[in-house]
Image (cartoon, rainbow, N blue to C red):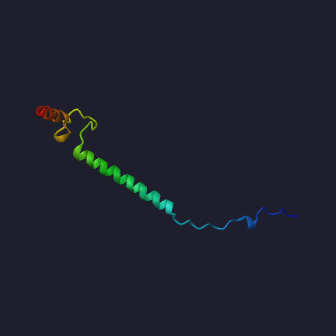
């Protein structure tokens, strides 16, 4: 007498088709591209205008209408 076969043809799954790209995958890809582009543009701005250390602001001298010392002198001249 032979042993019963353990092969069950109903348990074999058919190969599944590859899922289509969803709208969320496209949005993920677009946002990734936007972040990469923003990082590249920020790096280009820092190369053009920045200097190490970029946060050093002691060299900045306010000029024009935003120089409150000159505005105060002009107002005190009229008084």
Q: In which quadrant of the rendered image does the N terminus lie?
A: bottom right
Residue 36 appears at what percent x and percent y?
Answer: 37, 52
Residue 17's quadrant in the figure? bottom right
Relative to residue 70, is residue 53 drawn left or right? right
Q: Is residue 8 above or below residue 38?
A: below
Q: Is residue 55 above or below residue 44?
A: above
Q: Is residue 14 above or below residue 74?
A: below
Q: In which quadrant of the rendered image does the C terminus lie?
A: top left
Relative to residue 14, is residue 35 drawn left or right? left
* Residue beneath the point at 49% across and 60% down: 25
Residue 73 appears at what percent x and percent y?
Answer: 14, 32
Direction right: furthest residue: 1
Residue 60 appears at what percent x and percent y?
Answer: 20, 36
Q: In this orientation, which residue lies closer to the viewer: 31 or 18?
A: 31
* Residue beneath the point at 34% across and 49% down: 39
Residue 58's quadrant in the figure? top left
* Residue beneath the point at 26% across and 48% down: 45
* Residue beneath the point at 28% across and 36% down: 55
Direction left: furthest residue: 77
């Amino acid at each position: 007498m032979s042993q019963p076969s353990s092969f069950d043809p109903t348990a074999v799954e058919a190969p599944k088709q590859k899922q289509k790209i969803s709208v969320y995958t496209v949005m993920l890809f677009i946002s990734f591209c936007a972040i990469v582009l923003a990082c590249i543009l920020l790096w280009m701005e820092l190369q053009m205008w920045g200097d190490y250390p970029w946060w050093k602001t002691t060299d900045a001298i306010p000029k024009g209408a935003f120089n409150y010392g000159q505005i105060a002198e002009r107002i005190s001249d009229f008084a």
